[in-house]
């Protein structure tokens, strides 16, 4: 049998006023098996960012229903909610054929955020520690900035230890 793989992707993200992408924290998520791949994100217009991957080495683009990219989005004090729009999305197949994807959009709103509250139940507790440990061990879940306790762009043992310290100090 033969298999056609997506070897590179590109898409544009238009953000509502008050949101921006922290490009240094963006990248390929654990759902992509080829760990040599990179995602480059840059602003191409006011509130519009373009994401472009380096070519994949003809490995499957992603396995299962796992996250493929991580985009770090932050809000400033002017953010009141709005719509995020994904446009100009396409992949390039290993047969050198461009595969256009359908544009999409979704609404985002302001929510209360508790650092360490990975399961979003309103408090940081042992279940959040277990979820973060599971993320670090398996690396196949969606990334949540709530897991990045020390805000270094990575979720690792130092975040788990910081979360445990935080919970014990409450």
Image (cartoon, rainbow, N blue to C red):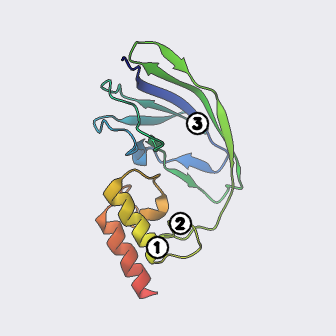
Q: From the viewer's side, name the closer residue of 115 and 141.
A: 141
Horizontal and vertical percent position of residue 148? 41, 62
Which residue is located at x 37 percent, y 78 percent?
Answer: 164
Circle 1 is placed at which residue position?
A: 127
Q: Is residue 60 left or right of residue 106?
A: left
Q: Dot 1: what SS?
A: helix
Q: Quadrant of the N terminus?
A: top left
- For residue 49, above or below residue 97: below
> What's the CA distance linking mark 2 and mark 1?
8 Å
Circle 3 is placed at which residue position?
A: 13
Instruction: Say whether marks 2 and 3 touch (CB < 8 Å).
Output: no
Instruction: Say whether marks 2 and 1 touch (CB < 8 Å).
Output: yes
Horizontal and vertical percent position of residue 79? 67, 55
Neighbour tally class for label 1: few under 14, some 14-19, many 20 plus, Cα within 10 Å:
some
Which residue is located at x 64 percent, y 60 percent?
Answer: 77
> What's the CA distance linking mark 2 and mark 3?
26 Å
Circle 2 is placed at which residue position?
A: 119
Horizontal and vertical percent position of residue 84? 65, 42
């Amino acid at each position: 049998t033969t298999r056609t793989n997506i070897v590179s992707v590109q898409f544009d993200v238009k953000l509502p006023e008050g949101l921006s992408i922290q490009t240094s924290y963006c990248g390929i998520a654990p759902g992509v098996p080829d760990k040599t791949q990179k995602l480059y994100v840059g602003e191409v217009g006011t509130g519009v960012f373009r994401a472009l991957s380096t070519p994949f080495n003809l490995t499957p683009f992603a396995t299962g229903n796992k996250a493929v990219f991580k985009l770090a989005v932050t809000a400033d004090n002017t953010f009141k909610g709005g719509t995020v729009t994904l446009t100009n999305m396409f992949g390039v197949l290993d047969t050198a054929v461009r595969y256009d994807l359908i544009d999409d959009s979704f609404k985002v709103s302001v929510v209360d955020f508790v650092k360490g509250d990975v399961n979003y139940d309103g408090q940081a507790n042992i279940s959040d520690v277990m979820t973060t440990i599971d993320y670090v061990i398996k690396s196949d879940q969606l990334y949540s900035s709530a897991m990045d306790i020390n805000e270094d762009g990575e979720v690792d043992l130092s975040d788990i230890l910081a979360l445990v310290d935080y919970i014990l100090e409450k």
